[in-house]
Structures are given as C-alpha cells and as structure tokens.
Amino acid sequence: MPADPMSGAEANGHPPSRQHDDESNTRTAHHNNSGLEIDMKPTEKTQHSLTIGRRSFLGGAAALGVGAGLAAPAIITRAAATETSSIIALRDHDLPFIATEETYTTDELIALNAINDDHVEYLKETGLAELGPGRIGAMDQAGINVQILSAHTPGVQDLAGQEGIDFAYRLNRMIATGPMVTYPGRFRAYATLPLQDPAASADELERAVREDGFVGAMTNGFIGKKFLDHPDFEPLLARAEALGVPIYLHPGFPPKEVFDIYYRIMQPGYNDEYQDYILSGSGYGWHQEVLTQCLRLIMTGVFDRFPKLQMIIGHMGEGLPFYYERIVGDLGDTTERSLNKPIGQYFNDNFWYTTSAFFQDELLHLLLRYISVDRVMFGTDYPFADMKQGTDWFRAVDLPREAKEKIAFRNAEKLFGIKV
C-alpha cells in the first residue's frame, strides 16, 4: 500500500487539490500497491495550506458566533467558557508533554511508497523528513519534551522478503544513531517492522528494543489481506508481550477488494478530488478499520492467550467512545462463553488511547466516560497536525491537574518506561 498522501483527518492530509480551469495540467494515473488507481496532477498550492486557511476562518467565525445562529446568551456563555479555559491554560502552562504519535520519513521511504512525483513533492513539503533543528524548534515552541517517532504509513510492511527486513533495519538504525543520539532525551521511537515476515518482525522488534532503546512497534492497518489477529502473527504478539512493549495500531489503506466494495466511486463527476481514496482513508475508512481490528483482536481471544499484551490506538479512540455502549451491549452476551472477561474490560486492560489530531474537548470527555484516565496519552500527529495547537488546546481542557498530568506525560512514562 502507498504512503498516505492525504492524512486528512489527521489535520492536513488531503492531496494537492485539482485545479478546474481550462489550463490545468494533464492528470496522471497510478496504481498503488493495493491496486487502487489514483488520479493526480500538479497544483500550485497544497490542500494543507488551504485547510489551515479554512480552519483559521472557521475558528474566528465560531468565536464570534458568526453564521452559527447563536443567540446572545449562547455567545455570552461561550465567552465565559473561553475565559475559564484561559484561566485553566495559565494554571497548566508548565505541563510537560510526551507526544506519542509523531511521524517521520526518509527519501528512501518516500521513493518506496509515493504515488507519483506530485506526491513526492507533497511529502517533502510537510517536513516529515526533518529530524533536526526545525522539528526541535517546533517542539520547543509547543512545549513538547519528547516525541515518539514512527515511520510514515505504511512503513515497509508491504515489502516482502529480505528487502523488507533490511529496509526496516536501516530505518530503525537511522533513528537510533541519528536524532536519538543528536538530541538526547528528545526522541524515542516505535520500531518499523517487515510484517510480511512475522518471525523476522518479532526478531527486529526485540533487537530494536534491546539494542536501540525503542519503546514498541507500529503497524499500519491491513497487512496484505490480514489483521494482527491472524494466527500468522502470533510470534510477533508473543514477543511484544514478553518484551513488555506495546504495538501501536495505526490505520492503513484497504486491499483492492475492500476498496471496491466499500469506497470506490464510479459516478462521473463525483470523484474529481480523490473522494473515494480519502473516504477509504483519513476521511472515514481508516478509523472504522482500526476499531474493527481492535474488536477482532478481542473476539478471537488474542488477549486471553496474551493477557499482558498492550495495544495503542490514536485519534481519540478511533470512534470507540461513540460505539462503546452498543459494542458492549450487543457483543457482551454473545462473547460471554468464548472470552475470559466481559468484552468491555479488554478496552481498559489491553488498550491505550491517544489524542492525536483530535483536539476536541467533547471527544476527550466522551472517551474518559468509558476509559480510565490512566489509559489516555497525549499525541499530536505531527506534522499532519500542529504541535502548538495541540498543546495549547490541552492546557485549556477543563480537567483536574492530576488527570492532565497523566494524559500529558505520566501515562506515557509508565507505559514506555521513560522519564521526561
């Protein structure tokens, strides 16, 4: 599967927008590794900048109640809430942060996963490959003490054989001997794994943890046509449990068969902006896919066989808080005899959750309605979301100081065995 040219729900990830004038450049088509035909062409301006501009306008309008049909009392109430948030932000201005889903790439990884030349240019413009002063400066400005780095989706997990094994090793060593050494204490990392070979993945995870000090591994959605609950991956799951490190379940793009059934748009004129590709990914499909994989891991008894195994999911639970009561209600009785524990218990015993790119108070409070505050960690999804926007948001969230410290850094310290 290709690297994600959109990363849209992660705050900026739409591909370069198509121009609609008569002088627009000729489109180019490319089939990615899952068989999806992607139609792209050069643009003068990335969707990232357009999105930020739109967000800035909407944020200003919302603050004033413009166009929202707000009555005067509602505007006054919002103003009072804003004042309260400002006071809380001042109280918590000194919060340290460990950011738990922060992305990087390299020219070699871009060459492996990019869809076409425009995609290459887009990925380079994001700052993904910058692991030096520029990133450190942005971290300092945002007040982020540590970033946990991960390779850009889908890493090397679609590359088979020795080539995939060697590529994963090179990426992991580059992080271990590069930014982790150059900026001591500022960067840690999830291992990139050659998941086409589960046994080799288990070995590389152990090497990266023991030799390079990595804190876990990251996977990216479908591995071919399988999820991690498939028996093939039990050696990797067993090794992660034995090492006491988590696996981050990042989303990825679906196989062609899934894409064709669920997401492909054939109607002429309704797919000129990559609508089906975005629908299958950051616009919707990614989040459903991660939650589906979580449920499959639970329902196939993975956590009964590996009770200490830990998984991380991002984006404020990938929709879990919204569906939690329905999941527990409808699946609880049917799994009572097949599982060792109530289905809802696994979500608090075997999963951790990050705020990556979902900087919304109401979503955080909904997540905390069902999940212990001891299981939630801060993340930004940089560079697809703005680090300072994330920390500014969280400093102003109305939660007790103790709870905010847990989310901002203490839970990550506990899970990863590190210190700010």
Image (cartoon, helix red, strand yellow):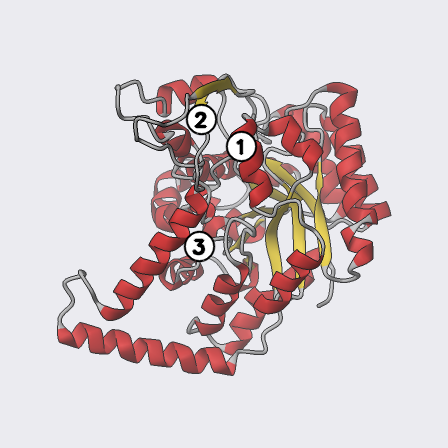
Tag 2 near tag 1, CB within 8 Å:
yes
Q: Which mark, residue 215?
A: none
Q: Secondary structure at mark 2?
A: strand
Real-space CA distance between mark 2 and mark 1, rounded to the nearest whole angstrom: 8 Å
Q: Residues within 10 Å of mark 3 (few under 14, many from 20)?
A: many
Q: Residue furthest right?
A: 211
Residue at image point 41% right, 25% down: 25
In the picture of the structure, the residue carrying the numbered disc 1 is: 119
In the picture of the structure, the residue carrying the numbered disc 3 is: 358
In the picture of the structure, the residue carrying the numbered disc 2 is: 40
| Mark closest to the chain's N terminus, 2 or 3 | 2
Instruction: List x then y, in percent, for residue 262.
Output: 36, 24
Question: Is 157 rendered above or below residue 63?
Answer: above
Tell which tag, 2 or 3, sits nearer the viewer.
Answer: 2
Give the quadrant of residue 268: top left
Q: Residues within 10 Å of mark 2 (few under 14, many from 20)?
A: many
Q: Quadrant of the N terminus?
A: top right
Tell which tag, 1 or 3, sits nearer the viewer.
Answer: 1
Q: Secondary structure at mark 3?
A: loop
| Mark closest to the chain's N terminus, 2 or 1 | 2
At label 2, the amino acid type is Met
| Residue 318 appearing in the image | no
Q: Secondary structure at mark 1?
A: helix
Residue 381 placement, left or right of 41: right
Instruction: List x then y, in percent, for residue 6.
Output: 47, 38
Real-space CA distance between mark 2 and mark 3, rounded to the nearest whole angstrom: 28 Å
Residue at image point 41% right, 29% down: 277
Real-space CA distance between mark 1 and mark 3, rounded to the nearest whole angstrom: 25 Å
At label 3, the amino acid type is Phe
Instruction: List x then y, in percent, for residue 282.
Output: 44, 39
| Mark closest to the chain's N terminus, 1 or 3 | 1
